[in-house]
Image (spheres, helix red, strand yellow):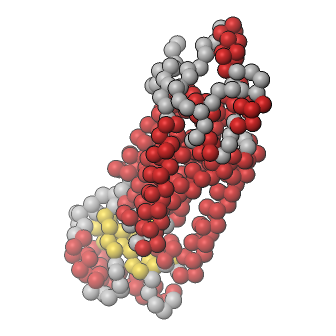
Amino acid sequence: MRHLRIVPDDTNFDFMRFRRISFPFSAAMSVLALLAFFFVGLNYGIDFLGGTLIEVQSKAGPADLAKMRSTLNALELGDVQLQEFGSPRDVMIRIPQQPGGEEAQQAAVAKVRGALGDTVDYRRVEVVGPRVSQELLISGTIGMMLAVFGILLYLWFRFEWQFALGAMIANVHDLVLTVGFMSLLQIDFDLTSVAALLTILGYSVNDTVVIFDRIREMLRRYKKLPIDQLINIAINSTLSRSIITHVTVTLALLSLLIFGGPTLYSFSATMTFGAVLVGSYTSIFIASPILIYLGVGRNREKGGVEDEAEETTADDKKGGAPLPLVKGGRGA
């Protein structure tokens, strides 16, 4: 039975020649993302700002958002947000934090109930205080920092420090661009978004480790092959696996993005950008070529006694096909 091959076995695309373009491009995009974060800011949700979340369902057909918005704005509770989710009858109401503590939040809920009356069913009422929201924000930040540190240690022990540093630079690049994306589009930044960012970290590392593992294997096997050619061969040999993985993940995320509704929008939109668009680009055009600048393979080339021609001959004697060599210059 033949295996599914999205990419031919003899593919020898030269990815490394784009490193002189990808690095300046990523640096410029990272600067823009940081500017968006500092000057535009994130759209923090109730989880981090505090406030009240009420989910209601209209009893008489589709909800009239314009009428409900006008009714609730007359209560003078601040910037009350209404959003349809699920079916046209379901509405999510977000009330900002009210001055006066817990009693003020409960009073705001009572005002909403009195204004809407018995025209809706109340499915969920959730009040998040300012102290809880600050604790959630701090805990989420600490959780992300611990995840990054744990990934760094894992890669350091499994590979070498150059691989760990390269993967960390790639992961920080993914996080910075994703946070900038959320800032520009004002996507709600809540606990769901933190979960999405942590998932992006894991997904990006998984894709990068597959390529790194192939590079490490070839570093032991080919003693004199230029490092840029070696990395090209490693990426090309894992390209079919990467494409299949990214396509399946994209289909799942697009389903959540289209049919998941507002409740899952922040998660699915963040994941679609960070994991599918940025993560796949970073693994190939940032994490892999940065190994060249970190000096991976230099001692191997100086101290190696076998060359790639001899090893290829040995492979042929064993019946294996030699790996394709990508044309390109040596070094950075």
Viewer-closest of 77 and 146: 146
In the figure, residue 233 lies in which quadrant? Answer: top right
Q: Is residue 120 left or right of residue 12?
A: left
Instruction: Please determine whether, in this image, residue 134 is positioned above or below residue 173.
Output: below
- Is 140 positioned to the left or the right of 121 in the image? right
In the image, residue 316 sits, relative to residue 51, either above or below, namely above
Quarter of the figure with the C terminus: top right
- Tell me if I can see residue 196 in this picture: no
Q: In this view, does 1 lie to the left or right of 73?
A: right
In the foreground, 21 or 151: 21
- What residue do we see at 63% from left, 48% from top? 166
Query: At 73% across and 43% down in the image, what residue appears?
Result: 160
Q: Tag count in the figure?
A: 0
Residue 19, how many percent across, how many down?
50, 43
Question: For the point 69% across and 57% down, which residue is it?
Answer: 149
Measured along the vertical axis of the image, is residue 79 above or below residue 250? below
Q: Can residue 26 be seen in this view?
A: yes
How far across and down, in percent of the image, does residue 306 sit? 74, 21
Question: What residue is drawn where x is 63% and y is 52%?
Answer: 168
Location of residue 329 (image quadrant): top right
**Residue closest to the eye, 40 or 32:** 32
Residue 287 in picture, x, y percent from top left: 58, 45
Q: Position of residue 43 (x, y in %)?
A: 42, 70
